[in-house]
Image: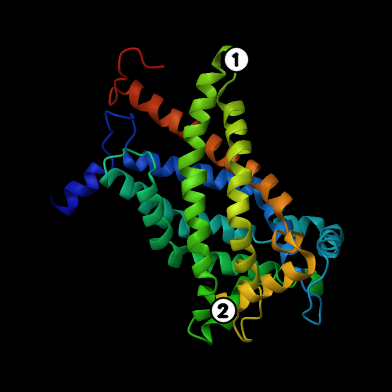
Amino acid sequence: MSVMQTYNDYFVVSPKNGLSQFQTMTAYLGGSAFQTVLDNPVTAYRQLVQQYAKDAAGKPVDPKVATAEATAVFKANPAAACMSGLVPRIIGVGFKRVPKFGILLGLSFFLGEDGTISATSAFGASVLSAPFINPIRMIEKQQRAYFKTTGAEKPIADILKESAKQNFQPLFRGTVPLMGHSLASALLGLAGQPKLQKYIKNELSHYGIGTFISGLLASAAVTPIYVAVTNPLSRLEVIMQTSKIEGKSIGVTEACKEMVTDSKRFGLRGVFRGQGLGIAKGILSLTAFHQGRIWLTDAFRNHNISNGSYVPPVGSA
């Protein structure tokens, strides 16, 4: 098969789901952009709650103290705090999501799944996309890392200049926990939520439950499991990615030891700092992402029906 043929096939509408690979990818990116804008304030606040787990002397502090410090930072400059990290996250919709969704959907179509997500596709995408995603996440967290002392975002240019002195190696800190985080996100968020949403919608259809409410209920059901799995991994990322770029890097083993020390002093509250925020963020993020994706998917499918490139099966909704 020629490169041109492969390129053309990317825009061919599948008779199974009424969408081309290009339209499916665009719907995923659009849903991701919608989610990113809506959940950024919660994302920023949660990072600070996890980041302020240590005091100036490097000793663990009570989760309540960390939450109070994060709240104080937000109250001091609410607009800047809520918007912090949004630019790299929006840019990351392209730099992070194109590789992740591209690999995910590419594997899905290659395996004959036509846009549905299997465990095999999720695993492959989580491992192969991590090197593309991690630098953006590192920059995002570095922007917020010094809010308590400066009251402002750290400029992206400064982060890149400091990284360049070490051949940009610091941008790949936290890649290992990210792979685990990405796998859980793909399995539970991208694969599990749509299946659960479909089940809920079918079961509650006689109560007039529509797509949005069924999506919200599915997200609420999936999120506690997702956050329980990913919250410790998220803590590892924050520990590894918010240390000074020009200073000594923190490896996975050292970050794990820091979490163990935290748990010995504060129990599960220390391990699961930001858990409640994570659940709130997860419900908001999953619902916003899938709702945006569904809106675009329906719009593309209706367009394909109107121009005759897709004919729905007889009896389909």
Q: Position of residue 148 (x, y in %)?
A: 80, 70
The quarter of the displayed image where residue 68 is located: bottom right
Q: Is residue 242 left or right of residue 23?
A: right
Residue lying at 45% horizontally and 42% vertically, measured from the top left: 191
Q: Is residue 264 left or right of residue 128?
A: right
Looking at the picture, which amino acid does disc 1 mark?
Gly
Picture colour scheme = rainbow
The answer to whether mark 2 and mark 1 are in CB contact below 8 A is no
Looking at the picture, which amino acid does disc 2 mark?
Gly
Q: Which residue is label 1 attached to?
A: 208
Q: Position of residue 200 (x, y in %)?
A: 54, 25
Q: Is residue 45 above or below residue 217?
A: below
Secondary structure of the residue carrying tag 2 is loop
Residue lying at 70% horizontally and 63% vertically, measured from the top left: 271
Name the N-terminal-most of marks 2 and 1: 1
Residue lying at 35% horizontally and 50% vertically, measured from the top left: 120
Q: Nearer the viewer, residue 129 or 226?
A: 226
Q: Nearer the viewer, residue 225 or 83?
A: 225
Q: Is residue 140 left or right of residue 56?
A: left
Q: Nearer the viewer, residue 201 or 71?
A: 201
Q: Which residue is label 2 attached to?
A: 251
- Marker count (numbered): 2
Q: Is residue 164 above or below residue 26?
A: below
Separation (CA) of disc 2 from disc 1: 51 Å
